[in-house]
Image (spheres, rainbow, N blue to C red):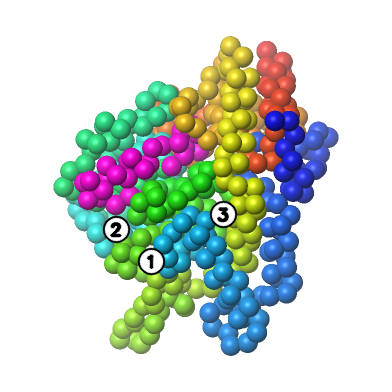
Amino acid sequence: MTNSKYRKDFPILSQLVHDKPLVFLDSANSSQKPLSVIETVSNYYLNDHANIHRGIYELSIRATKKFEDARLNIQKFINASSAHEIIFTSGTTAGINLIAQSFGKAFIKENDEIIISAMEHHSNIVPWQLLCEQTGAKLKIIPIFDNGELDLDSYKKLFNARTKIVSVVQASNVLGTINPIREMIKIAHENNVPVLVDGAQAIPHMPVDVSDLDCDFYVFSSHKAYGPTGIGVVYGKEKWLNRMPPYQGGGDMIETVSFEKSTYNKIPYKFEAGTPNIADVIGFSAAIDYMQQIGMKTIFQHEQTLLQYATQKLLEFPDVKIIGTANNKVGVIAFVLDHIHPHDIGTVLDYNGIAIRAGHHCAMPLMERFNIPACARASFGIYNDEKDVDALIEGIYAVKRWFN
Ligand code: PLP
């Protein structure tokens, strides 16, 4: 692989930063947007906007159709069995909070147990901690090995009669580890426990089939998958969603309202109170079209090639340590450099036009597990190529010159 032929689809990438061509290696944080997505959102506002589900005039009917077509597109993209199982939220974080609160209200009480893993993003830790504070339930943590793989034997031993849900990430935003979630879901189901999968770092990079995984819930964000910010999806099996109470109250989520009692709409609307982010739902659907035109297998392969190339190049530095060396990874490489703080790495790279992330990556317990306060992270999207990796390597030489 040489130049990515997809780079030209992303107008933002043609700019200079500090007089250097922009090298964007922070897609795990948020990806850039192809022109087709930008134009879809802009065309919607130019031609089609009105509020949805309530108008009886042409614009509203058109906007409603585009919005509901997006739901169908997403249903097909992840192979959910019904469009009613697709709920729009503002992102992965909002999705996990929705499930924690609504599932929690219906099914979790004092001394019940919730299993998460040691590699979770804060957004798959704190919503469960809030629920534990409210109910007196407890968190149980699946440990990880030094290479960044989950300890499945320990996982199996965490189940007991009080276990009510497992909530686990499919691909880690720091280690890059792709967890064997199909197997983990099977183990949970053998214990009659449902599973929520945090797919924020999987959806942009690999084919995902929720029916094949047999997960009970799956959440993801649009902005990491070439779509607009402020939109995300909760997939939930109908059998659970129907038994869960609404998360928020307001317009659209009701069937009838009186001061004595209100009744609620059917799913998914029961979970979509208020005017949704219509334009960005439609924009996300365009992002899904973009990914599908390339093909999720091609995207995965492209990023795997880059991951291998970058890993090999980084390992040539004796003072670089890669955090997360699992066999099965997405295109994410976290690393530390002896005696140089990750923020300093990030700053010097930025002078060279290279955008990476540095910090705790919203995974403070994971930093503690690996005994580091922070790390640097390069992550790939479809627009990256080997030239970007070469620029990163040159940039690390520049960092070392600067500080030594
Ligand atoms: N889960 C994982 C694995 C993530 O990487 C992120 C964001 O980095 C999130 C959840 C939260 O996503 P959002 O900020 O889009 O809600």
Tag of residue 247 = 1
Percent position of residue 364, x then y = 44, 35
Q: Label 3 vs label 2: CA separation? A: 25 Å
Position of the N terminus by quadrant: top right
Residue drawn at point x = 45 percent, y = 63 percent: 86
Tag of residue 222 = 3
Percent position of residue 67, x then y = 57, 70
Q: Report whether residue 19 is seen.
A: yes
Residue 351 lies left or right of residue 299; in this view the side is right
Q: Label 3 vs label 1: CA separation? A: 21 Å
* In this view, 361 is above or below 368: below
- Regarding mark 1 in the picture, which secondary structure is present there? loop
The answer to whether the residue labelled 2 contacts the one labelled 1, judged by CB atoms less than 8 Å apart, is no
Q: Amino acid at mark 1?
A: Tyr
Percent position of residue 313, x then y = 63, 19
Residue drawn at point x = 68 percent, y = 75 percent: 48
Label 2 crowd (10 A; few <14 / some 14-19 / many >=20): many
Residue drawn at point x = 30 percent, y = 32 percent: 152
Q: Earlier in the sequence, mark 3 or mark 2?
A: 2
Q: Earlier in the sequence, mark 2 or mark 1?
A: 2
Label 3 crowd (10 A; few <14 / some 14-19 / many >=20): many
Q: Where is mark 2, residue-wise?
A: 104
